Amino acid sequence: MKIIDPVFLLVFILNVYTVKSLECLCGISEVPVTDPYNIQKLEKDNCEIPENEKKGCVEHGACYGTCQTDGFCFKSIKREDGIIRRIYRCLAKSVLKPEGQPMHCHVHDGVTSSFQLGCCNTTLCDLPLTFSPPTKDSGDQDRLILILSISVPIVTLTLVSLISILIYKQCQPRFGYQVVSRPIQNNVIIDLGNSRSISSQMVDDSQSTLKEMLESTCSGSGAGLPILVQRSIARQVSLLECVGKGRYGEVWKGMWRGGYVAVKIFSSRDEKSWFRESEIYQTVMLRHENILGFIASDNKDEGIMTQLWLVTEFYENGSLYDYLSRHTVSEEQCIRMALSIATGLAHLHMDIIGTQGKPGIAHRDLKSRNILVKRDLSCAIADLGLCVKHNSVTDEVDIPINNKVGTKRYMAPELLNETINEKHFDSWKRADVYSVGLVYWEIVRRCRASSLHQEYQMPFYDVVSPDPSIEEMKEVVCIKRLRPDCPDEWNENEKLKSMVKLMKECWFENPTSRLAILRLKKNCVQILDSCEDVKKMSQILEEQEQEEEENKLMNSDSGLVKS
């Protein structure tokens, strides 16, 4: 049998008696406020009953039980509904946190008029707690809490009701207004619950086509269709196929009123970009044959998310980037493309003063992917989401509030090194001209007149990575001052030589040395006129040669007859 060490036993007994050495009052009592010695309730649950009952008696006449603790004695008093409630109990040392100022022993100043508590560390101690007189601030606070408790639920319910009504109206089809002059017959109702589904329409001869509707509702102001039509167009368009993807979303080919349309679908997180581009496209007097035709903007609820639609004209050839990747162009086509781009940008930059005037607009993201090729191979400028507008009255520049920047490969030197004067509108126009020079280089590279037939490449393809950073472009454009290479073969052709001169005058490092957009347009016209003159001269020479051959034949025939 193992014998217990007497020293260990002595230490254990001392620890037991020293750990719980404080005796405290224990129990709960209730007395009326008007008669503090009339004890109506006294509870001693979970308390020890001392042999001498008077041991636990206190000043107000109640006799409580006791308890042992290694921490503090606790007391609280509370006044409520004309009753004063006292609570005595023990607090263990383990719950007294933080040390030195335990939160169980302190009360907030705002409630001391009806509630008090405290701690003490003497045997059977009874703290003399009293209520503090009520203050004006506490009354004001109570009234504020009451007002908030009533008003907040009412305001919340009102907001929820308004939002529900708006969502209901948004999701329901709109009726009760005439949108075209001709009646619509044999129209198939399109359900776009699944945006990937392909629907169809039967178009009757009496139904307004897309072209007719645009001509009857768009007066050239550039504002697109009437607002009532715009707010329901997402339920009338049939999506056919996805034709492109970008950083803002997807571009779909759609069918609407017997014609093809392009639908640019933004995600809800890009709402600022969608709103800005819709705002720019609806600028008065913006509509131009070399700027993408705007039809409508709308939003469509897809259940888990909201799609933001931008509906525009559709061009089968796609972007200039896509077209040049698949096709080459002749001399005349090359110059006509360059002229149409300069014409569209000149209209975009132009301030039109008047009661229905147009502000000057700079694109800020010109590149071959943001220029579309029409059926006649002329070009139209698209993607106006990053544009800046110029207020000619106040001479202020309206810059969109978003974190998007233009395509780094096409950025002008002053944008890369951040030396551009953002408050000066001409600075933004000159940055656009720099980008146009790079686009011209892409077109000339695919011109069939060049003896060196080259595959399509983007500017700086040979000196930067496929997705260059701003620092990478800054080193190439600003520090090394490199520009796209122009082969000597281009200078052997007079038309291409003129185009090379144009593009080099567009990408000067000093913005003020670059061609103005109107000067650029005029030079393109002159190059095209020279092409027409050469064409006419060649036709005249061909006609003269044909006449000479006919005369020779006639002379030979007459000689045979004489013989």
Image (cartoon, rainbow, N blue to C red):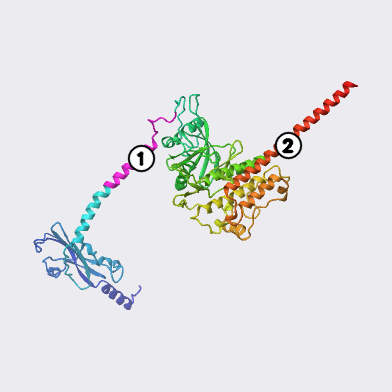
| Side of 58 where 548 appears, left or right | right
Residue 171 in the image: x percent, y percent? 39, 37
Q: What element carries label 1?
A: helix
| Residue 155 is a magenta residue | yes
- Residue on which disc 1 sits: 166
Main SS of the magenta part reads helix
Determine whether the residue tagged by mark 2 lies in a helix, strand or loop. helix
Query: Does residue 17 sit above or below 280 in this rendering?
Result: below
Which residue does the numbered mark 2 point to in the structure image? Answer: 538
User: What residue type is disc 2 on?
Assistant: Ser
Q: Does the magenta stretch include residue 4?
A: no
Amino acid bearing label 1: Leu
- CA gap between label 2 and label 1 equals 68 Å
Q: Which residue is drawn at 75% across and 33% down?
A: 542
Q: Residue at x 36, y 38 (%)?
A: 168
Q: Residue 82: horizontal and vertical position, in percent?
A: 13, 58
Asked whether, in this view, residue 492 is left or right of residue 244, the answer is right
Residues rendered magenta in the picture:
154-180
Q: Which of 33 and 318 is in front in this view?
A: 318
Q: Is residue 501 above or below residue 535?
A: below
